[in-house]
Amino acid sequence: MKKPTHGLATRAIHGKHMHAFKGPVAPPIVQTSTYRFDNSHDAVRYAQGDPEVYVYTRYHNPTVRTAQEHLAEVMGTEQALLTASGMAAISSATLAVTKAGDTIISTPALYGGTYRFFRDILPRHGITVRYCDPHKPDALRTMITPATKLVYFESPTNPTLAVVDIPALVAAVRAAQRRTRRHVTIMCDNTFATSLNQRPIELGVDVVVESATKYLGGHSDIIAGVVAGTAAMVADAHFQMKYYGGCADPFAAYLLLRSMKTFALRVVRQNASAMELASWFERHPRVLRVLYPGLRSHPEHAAATRQMVPGAGYGGMVTIEVPGGVKGAVKVCDALQVAVNAMSLGGAETLVSIPVYSSHVGMSARELKRHGVTPGMVRISVGLEDVADLKADFDRALRRIS
Ligand SMILES: *Cc1c(COP(=O)(O)O)cnc(C)c1O
């Protein structure tokens, strides 16, 4: 792992090209599908694996490559791969380390798309996903067999904001590995926390995946994803991406680079506003429960504090449970005037969604129970508005519930 020479905000603004890049300050958008060879010697160089020869944008693109170098710098990894979406990052990275007959062990609380990919797609490729209780590292250790190639988790999780004790999980996997004598890749979806609040690689995780659609993009206007890890891991994920086709678009890469200039500023503010709102919700008479890792009342507050970046924050996602079940949640969401009733997260505008109608739609009562999701939950992605306006908005909406 590289030791960064600058702080995260500086790296998020300058990326890799600090004072070395003599071209335009803003990166050019190389919006092309293909590249002219000067002569067929270029084709030969490409065939021999020269990375400087561009051939086709599904393989490589200069704007996408600039974004990748930028993200590797921010995420503190050897390399990063930019993909068409967070799901393209997750599918490329998981398929890069597994094949038919292999097993993945995952924590059960997952982003809905990932859960369905694990449940409905991977078994068709002969890859089995088994679920472990992240709070029982000993059980995880004994679940690992020679067929286990990947341990996958999110923290904090969607939408319950549960925290996985990352050092404990890593220790359990590495202990099992000594027994089976086979390497197990540990992969973390760090979308909710981002590198500003949590650096899984520093805690012993091998690969980080993120939906860049969320906090990295930050303006609810792009779909993109990132795989960050060693050069070898990123090359393997790139191979999968190249043939499954989930390549990043140059314009999205440009918008992402633009977003990175304000990444630290945005997330610092979202951390602070989320903390303030969560504490306020905790005192609100119409709120039954507040789930936020920054609150002392959160069951894994201590683990969150230990493993998240000291002095940063606990992220911008807060989940509340309101009275009246899903009817209560609907009433609140429909009455909001500042916060927007929309899926997704991480944008400048506060977004709310009802997990049983969005990320966890169509799941059986048993699945919902396993995921800790209840009908009265409202998931809030805290935006950049004045906190006083958000409090007033939620207060008015919550008072609609009888
Ligand atoms: C949104 C999201 C994804 C999927 O990302 P897309 O960009 O929508 O493909 C994966 N994981 C988490 C935690 C997410 O919030």
Image (cartoon, grey):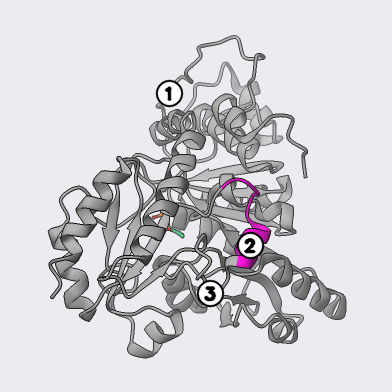
Q: Position of residue 281 (x, y in %)?
A: 34, 62
The residue at the point 56 percent across, 79 percent down is 129
Residue of label 3: 125
Which circle, 3 or 1, is nearer the viewer? 1
Q: Nearer the viewer, residue 364 or 308?
A: 308
**Residue 287 position (above or below residue 256):** below
**Residue 337 position (above or below residue 185):** above
- Helix or strand or loop: what does disc 1 sit on? loop
Relative placement, left or right, of 14 versus 253 is right
Q: Mark 3 is on which residue type? A: His
Q: Is residue 287 visible?
A: yes
Tell me which segment is drawn in magenta: 302-312
Q: Mark 1 is on which residue type? A: Ile
Of pointers 1 and 2, the one earlier in the residue sequence:
1
Q: Is residue 213 visible?
A: no
Q: How many marks?
A: 3
Residue of label 2: 187
Q: Position of residue 214 (x, y in %)?
A: 41, 48
Q: Which mark is residue 62?
A: none
Q: Nearer the viewer, residue 15 or 290?
A: 290
Of pointers 2 and 3, the one earlier in the residue sequence:
3
How many residues crowd mark 1 within 10 Å: few (<14), some (14–19), many (20+)?
some
Check the picture and name the quadrant holding the C terminus: bottom left
Relative placement, left or right, of 19 versus 391 is right
Q: Nearer the viewer, residue 46 or 83?
A: 83
Q: Determine whether label 1 and label 2 are within 8 Å by CB.
A: no
- Helix or strand or loop: what does disc 2 sit on? strand
- Is 16 within the magenta? no
Q: Position of residue 91 (x, y in %)?
A: 51, 61
Q: Which mark is residue 29?
A: 1
- Helix or strand or loop: what does disc 3 sit on? helix
Give the CA distance from mark 2 to mark 3: 20 Å
